Image (cartoon, grey):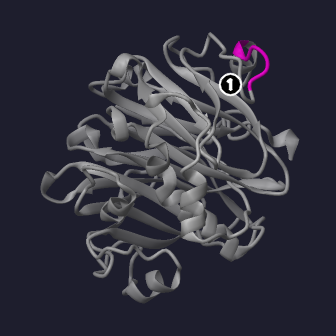
Amino acid sequence: MSVLLVRPAFTAHARQSKAGFTKSLARTDVADSRFDGLPKIFLKGLYDLLNHQARLGNRMKKLFSSLFVVVCLAGDTGTCAITATTSAAPIIASQLTNISTRAFVQTGDNVIIGGFIVQGTAAKKLIVRAIGPELIPYGVPNVLADPTLELHDATGALIASNDNWQTTIIGGIITADQVAEIQNSGHAPTVAAESAIIANLPPGNYTAIVRGVNNTVGVALVEAYDLSPSIPSPSILGNISTRGFVQTGDEVMIGGFIIQGTGPKRVIVRAIGPELIPYGVPDALPDPTLELHDATGALIASNDDWQHTIIGGIITADQVAEIQNSGHAPTVATESAIIGNLPPGNYTAIVRGKNIIVGVALVEVYDIGMGAF
């Protein structure tokens, strides 16, 4: 069996032109060749996330302690699902919405698997996307030419699927053609070969799986956009986790998330590798490193081995005890974690293998700051 996990957070920002967003992300204060090309990595998806929020307006073990365990059978990602109990969404000034994670899609266990929870008292309307060719204009090499998308519930059952968003696949929760609705959502993929599903999901736990048609491989995004008309809403999209195969260069794993609302959100961001081994996941990344960047591309925090805090940026004191007390301390010393009290804004978490090692890893963001809201 294998465990996946990620939990981001999100924000209201002024809408800007794509050119302006591209220009802002092209800036970086990091004097390190490893960061060359970083804007290309996370520019796609974050631009869409920002504009989505602007359109809608101002819209985890402690907080979600019993909520989240992602379980899937090794060698059968089709059964992947998150198992958990759901509870009412807390009343908060900021909340988690929308995720865009980029990674290299291979075959078998090494596809992209994104897990998320709908928590609260009402169903939440989402659009889930699998994006590949849209990355080409941003200079991303080796994109996945024809990504497919599956949506599974907490039991592992396939509840929706798509291969080419302009052709709806009827079945499960999809009972009518979705093409017009996708076009009107503001998040229609720009390439016909990409995939999308709109779903009105009741509170529960879900996984989105991205593969390549005919076992093709390449870089892709798995994305989930909250289509709720307002923030706060009766339900939230929380604790989002993505598992993928971490390579080198442009093919590392990048999770983009947004803190949306009026106040800061306290989160723990993790890069997990060896913890996957007991669950039968092959080729786990033995020593994942973690970087946290803001919307300008500036490096604001980093970690390599969670029991050794790296002071700098937003990290001003040793975090080991705080990580231990968070309920989310990694179980292996070579895994990485960062705790941050992040103001509303847009962030990317980047997972690499130390010494250019490759392997399967998780990028995760947990909301641990219920009291801060």
Residue 292 vertical placement versus 259 (above, below): above
Left/right of residue 153 with respect to residue 166 in the rendered view: right
Q: Nearer the viewer, residue 111 or 20?
A: 20
Residue 173, above or below 177: above
Decide if residue 245 is in sight here: no
* Quadrant where the N terminus is found in the figure: top left
- The residue beneath circle 1 is 327
| Magenta region, main secondary structure | loop
Answer with left or right where residue 36 lies relative to residue 293.
left
Q: Residue at x 50, y 36 (%)?
A: 350
Q: Residue at x 34, y 52 (%)?
A: 140
Q: Is residue 106 in sight in this rendering?
A: yes
Is residue 5 part of the magenta span, yes or no? no
Task: Tell me the magenta residue range.
Answer: 315-320
Residue at the image point whose x is 26% and y is 54% from the top? 211
Percent position of residue 33, x then y:
45, 30
Front one among 17 and 207:
17
Q: Is 371 rendered above or below residue 302?
A: below
Residue 279 falls left or right of residue 35: left
Q: Secondary structure at mark 1?
A: loop
The residue nearer to you, when weighing 24 against 13, is 24
